[in-house]
Amino acid sequence: MYSITARFNQIVFFTSWTLVVLSLLNQGTAYFFKTGKPTVDLKILSADKFHHYKATYYNGGVTDWDQVTFKFSLEADFEPVYNWNLKQLFLYVNVHHEHQENGFQSNCVIYDKIISRPDDPSLWSDSSKLVLKNQRAEYPLKDIHKQLRNATVNFEVWIEVMPYVGYIRREKLGDFQYKMPQQYN
Amino acid sequence: MAEGQSDTFWKSLYIYFNEMDFESQLFVKRIYKIVILTVAIISFIIAFFLERFSVCVYSTIGASVLCILVLAPAWPMWKKNQPNWQQANWQKQK
C-alpha cells in the first residue's frame, strides 16, 4: 500500500478473485434451476436425389457410393434446459444405421445449428422455440457399401449443452425411424 | 536525488500521487476489501432472483473501478496525517 502501483495491483487482483468465486457459485447454483428434458418432434418429409454416384480420381481410380439428401421438419422446445449458466446449445441431427449384410454401424450428421441464449429472461420463451419447416439437410448421407436401399435408418436428435462455467455434456433427445425407398429415384 | 536537481512536471506529479500517509494506507487496505465484497454478495443475490449473471459481473467490475479511482491515487484527503519529519540537513558531518 506504499505506492500507487501496489494499491492498484491489490485492488485489481482482489476483484479477479471475487469474480472467479462468483463464477463457481454460478455454476454450482445452476443445478437448483429447472433442468428438465426438452421436447422434440422430427418428421422426415422426403429423401431426394437418392442415386448411385460414381467419381474418378485424378490418377485413374474409380469409386462409387450411395448418396441421399433428406428434407425434414423439426419442432423443438428448449425452455427446460435454459438457466443462467447456459451459453449456447448445439443441436445436431445424426443418422444411425446398421448394415444388413455385415452388421457395420455408421453415423452421419446431416444438420446442425447453434442456439444462443439471450441474457434477458423475458426473451427466453421466444428464442427457445425452434420450428423448421421443409428444411433441407446440410450434409448428405453417404454409404460406401451401397446398402441404403430398403434399409431402416434411425434419426437421432442430439443436443450439446455448453455452459459458461462447467462441463460440456451431450444429450439425446429422440429417436425416429425411417424406411428408405426400395430403388434409386 | 542529489542536491541541485529538480524534477520534471510529470515526475513530480507521479510523486504527488504516490505518497500517502500511513494512517490512510491502513484505511485503504481495509476498506477496498469491504466495499468490493459487499457489492459482490448483494449483486449476486439480486442477480440470482433476476436470473441474469451479467448484473453481478458488471456491478463488481464497476465497484472495483470506483475503488481504483478513489483509493489508489493519493488525493489530498489521504494526506492529512503527515508524520513529523526531521529538518533536512544537507551539510556533511565533520
Image (cartoon, rainbow, N blue to C red):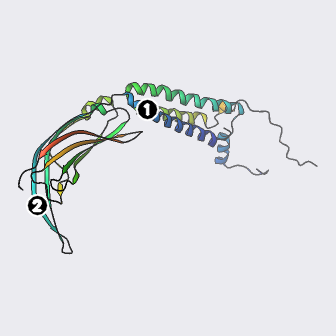
Q: 10 Å neighbourhood of mark 2: few (<14), some, or many (≥20)? A: some
In the picture shown, does residue A33 fall above or below A174? above
Who is closer to the viewer here, A30 or B77? A30
**The N terminus of chain A is located in which quarter?**
top right
User: Residue at 32% of width from left, 33% of height from top?
Assistant: A82
Residue A65, image x, y percentages: 15, 61
Q: Position of residue A17 (x, y in %)?
A: 53, 37
Position of B79 with respect to B94 (left or right) is left
Question: Hey, what amino acid is under mark 2?
Answer: His
Q: Secondary structure at mark 2?
A: strand
Residue A132 shows in this picture: no
Query: Mark 2 sits on what residue?
Result: A52
Q: Position of residue A46 (x, y in %)?
A: 9, 47
- Please tell me the numbered disc located at residue A87: none
Please give the name of the residue rendered at 18% of the width and 45% of the height, measured from the top-left corner. Answer: A154
Left or right: where does residue A100 sit relative to residue A169? left
Q: Which residue is mark 1?
A: A28
Q: Chain of mark 1?
A: A
Q: Residue at x 48, y 33 (%)?
A: A22
